[in-house]
Amino acid sequence: MSKQPASTPLWEVFIRPRNGLNHKHVGSLHAADGDLALQAARDVYTRRGEGNSIWVVLSKEIIASDPDLSEENFDPSSDKIYRHPSFYEIPDDIGHM
Amino acid sequence: MTNNQSYGGADHIEALLALADDHLILGHRLSEWCGHAPMLEEDLSLPNMALDLLGQARNLFAHVANLENCGKSEDDLAYLRSDREYKNCLMVERPNGDFAHTMLRQLYFAAFMQPYWQAMEDSTDDTLRALAGKAEKEMSYHIRHAGEWVVRLGDGTEESAHRMVNAVVALHPYTDELFEISAPLQNCIEHGLLPDPTPIRAPWQAMIEDIFSQAYLTIPDVPFPQEGGRHGRHTEDFGHLLSELQYMQRAYPGMAW
Amino acid sequence: MYSQGLIGADSETEESEEFLAAFQARIDREEKIEPNDPMPQGYRKTLVRQIGQHAHSEIVGMLPEGNWITRAPTLRRKIALLAKVQDEGGHGLYLYCAAETLGVSREQMTEELLSGKAKYSSIFNYPTPSWADIGAIGWLVDGAAIMNQVPLCRCSFGPYARAMVRVCKEESFHQRQGYELMMTLTEGTDAQREMAQDALNRWWWPSLMMFGPHDSESSNSDQSMLWKIKRFSNDELRQKFVDATVPQAERIGLTVPDPDLKWNPEKNDGEGGYDFGAIDWDEFWRVVKGGGPMNRDRIAARTKAWEDGAWVREAALAHAEKRKQRMQAAKVAAE
């Protein structure tokens, strides 16, 4: 076994199932560079026709929100019900609006 | 009908078998890697390429079985011929060697087959024409995948560069045979059934040179090109390959699996 | 979404009663736990161990079946087997990635497998001497694995559950191809039927062992159930497997090698089920501890692949570094 092998970077993989949909996170993999990561993503995550477009991004480049801050980040929006259509009353005979 | 020169004639069948054998034997060799690749990601890539090749082999054997129309199945053709009856080129039967060997062999083969399948889109053989579109795309991907690796290994570490050079020396003598025109193939070319490989030679060479230039590799002089596969003259390794491939069919003849 | 950069940064959880109770409350509300969420060390450790073992099992599991890829009797079987073994590699990959969200690297896990520190499913330490073993593995081993894996799709840890959804979706053809293969053998010649029965004889008991020790002997079980990492106990799943599999064997004229096997109408709250004979736990522990027929060969094969591949992995990294430097140099030159 070689001494302390350098580790191959981790990439996150996003696949668009078909045009008109968003790319969606499907998993991750290891590859030395972007081209190899794309090819590996194709071979690992699209074996059953799962998509027509792939994005890969180095996992370490992702900036994630802090779960400890999730309450102050996301709770304030929960009572802003005026942002939803059901907050406003419109007579039924107006029909769909 | 024994007209060697027409559709479904002996030469047509012989030339198709050579093509089918190339795909079968290379697919078989690649499949040997499954579970033993240098990284898990390649444990998925190598079988993908093997499955492409084995899938085309199946299509081609089925086509031959259909043309022969004598009750033989694709498996009879794939499994039950003697070594002299297999007409694959020698390169595809070469042992996998290390990862550099395997990737280079794949590049050499795919860089030939991609334009060859493309040319089959003009074949007078309807079945080949129907297979060509998909096969050509598969080969394009093999070129890309194997080509990326040849560049990385050629321009990676000292060890990988050394191994890459060894692979070129070992495998280049087998590349001439890709362009060989056997007598059956010659007849098929004349009838528009199969393409002439000759015009592919220059673009093939250009593609290899381009990839080699990125990989710091050079095409070696080959004083003694190796050939014989198209005439059923194989290397010693081929018998061992067949003894595995054919094991079940030989040990338990005539059974359904 | 998670970031490797954050993983482990906040791993010091205060394991006060209050913290543990709040965590349990989240679990009880069926909230999924994501990698950066606070979690008890025990939960993290259990998952790292379990997902790691699961991943190793997939990777080592490629070997016994891979043994027949080059000898598969027809092109159709060869292609199906190759695709199946390839899938197992994919499953190992998904699982390693799920474990990596908890801050262990694939290299670390690989070293632990090769050194013998990490375990994998003992079933893969049995040999595959005959073609029928490919059928038996697909039918029984994948069948048992599916029993285990379907509930894991609802595991409380998000990345594991998501990986399992993908695995289960892909595995649906595995058991079918195994059973179809066995069925073809039983419809064939005497030699083929013998081959099939022999494979069932060898794989039946090890398949039952796949569910692990009896609930009374299984130390980690209760906590895992409480944390909803596991949803059913070992014995529950084993019983489900026996009840599902025995009729499948009968249907194709094979005999389950258990003289004590008997239908019991009282079982499963009166729905009926099979009583079955005692499992040889001495054999189980022997194989788990390295004494199975193929333990050494399996680890040797994985070690060889890892060591033989080292120069390839190093070359790819070296090339990536060179490219990066060339790009930087070109940028500097352009400025």
Image (tube, grey):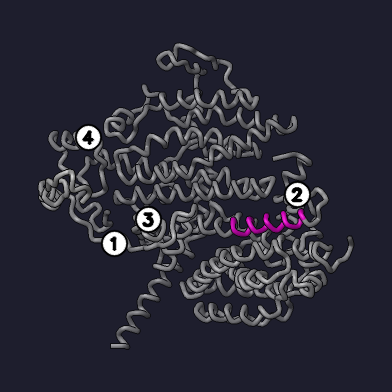
Residue at the far right: name it.
B2
Give me the C-alpha separation between circle 1 and circle 2.
Answer: 53 Å
Q: Gap between marks 3 and 4, in whole Å?
A: 28 Å
- The amino acid pointed to by label 1 is Lys
Kind of residue at badge 4 = Arg
In the image, are marks 3 and 4 on the same chain? no
Mark 3 vs mark 4, foreground winner is 4
Amino acid type at circle 2 is Ser
What stretch of residues is rendered in magenta? Answer: B51-66
- Name the residue tied to disc 3: A28
**Discs 1 and 3 carry the same chain letter:** yes
Q: Tell me which chain the residue with mark 3 is part of.
A: A
Q: Which residue appears at 69% of the width and 45% of the height?
A: C73
Q: Quadrant of residue C202?
A: top right
Q: Position of residue C198 (x, y in %)?
A: 65, 30
Q: Which mark is residue B73?
A: 2
Callouts 1 and 3 close, C-beta under 8 Å? no
Based on the picture, tell me whether residue B63 belongs to the magenta stretch.
yes
Circle 2 crowding by C-alpha within 10 Å: few under 14, some 14–19, many from 20: some
Q: What element carries label 4?
A: loop
Secondary structure under tag 2 reads: loop
Q: Which of C263 and B252 is in front in this view?
A: C263
Q: From the viewer's perspective, tell me whether residue C164 is left or right of residue B177.
A: left
Q: What element carries label 1?
A: helix
Mark linked to residue C29:
4
Q: Does C299 sit above or below residue B126?
A: above
Q: What residue sits right under mark 1 in the picture?
A: A60
For the point 53% across and 26% down, the residue is C245
